[in-house]
Amino acid sequence: MPDRRDDLPVLTDLDSVVAMVRQHRNDLYVRWSRGPATDLRDSGTGRSRDSLTGIPLPGLSANSMVVEPWWGDRPLRLWVARRLYDYLHLRELRGPGVRPWLLTGVEAGRGPDNEPLVHCRQPVAWIDGRALDDARTLVESQNSAEWGPLDRRG
């Protein structure tokens, strides 16, 4: 029987992800994993593990979708696209079934890459591959020779 924590709405395009960011202005995060049923199974709020050392971390490794003040009045759509694009490589790196999902939460610390470690309050939605394609298209249309995804595999 499927776990109800994975029974989330699916955001099928970038604009629907942007709408969710507008709705959850201060506590929305994106996580790349097999989903809340897996991530929340043991602790209820989630724990990640450092991939280099295996050390358990005090929360889920995630990235904030909250817009930083320095972004100013620039397009929210580009902010969201960039936040998704940064970690597209995790689908391949972490294997089958890994995809992005949104959650609300509270920061419990910082991970080894200075990413937020989050205690999940509530899983919110899955992000569909079409939304990721929209994000890739928008980011790549910026034509920046100095910027790219945060992929260590180089």
Image (spheres, rainbow, N blue to C red):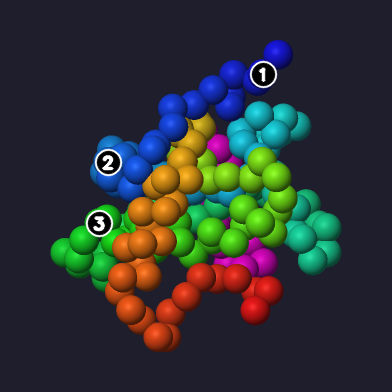
Majority secondary structure in the magenta region: strand
- Magenta residues (range): 107-121
Q: Which of disc 3 and disc 1 is earlier in sequence? A: 1
How many numbered badges does the structure rendering display?
3
Residue 108 visible in the current orientation: no
Badge 1: few (under 14), some or many (20 or more) residues near its Cα, within 10 Å? few
Name the residue beneath numbered marker 3.
76
Residue at image position (77%, 60%) is 51
Name the residue beneath numbered marker 2.
19
The quarter in which the N terminus is drawn is top right
> What amino acid does circle 2 point to?
Ala
Label 1: element kind: loop
Hey, which quadrant is residue 112 in on the image?
bottom right
* Image location of residue 138, percent across then percent down: 32, 63
Residue 109 falls inside the magenta stretch: yes
Badge 2: few (under 14), some or many (20 or more) residues near its Cα, within 10 Å? few
Report whether 150 appears left or right of 134: right
Hey, which quadrant is residue 150 in on the image?
bottom right
Q: Which mark is residue 2?
A: 1
Label 2: element kind: helix
Q: Mark 2 touching mark 1, by CB under 8 A?
A: no
How far apart in space, not on screen, are marks 2 and 3 (Cα)? 10 Å
Report whether 12 appears left or right of 22: right
* Image location of residue 94, percent across then percent down: 70, 53
* Image location of residue 9, percent across then percent down: 44, 27
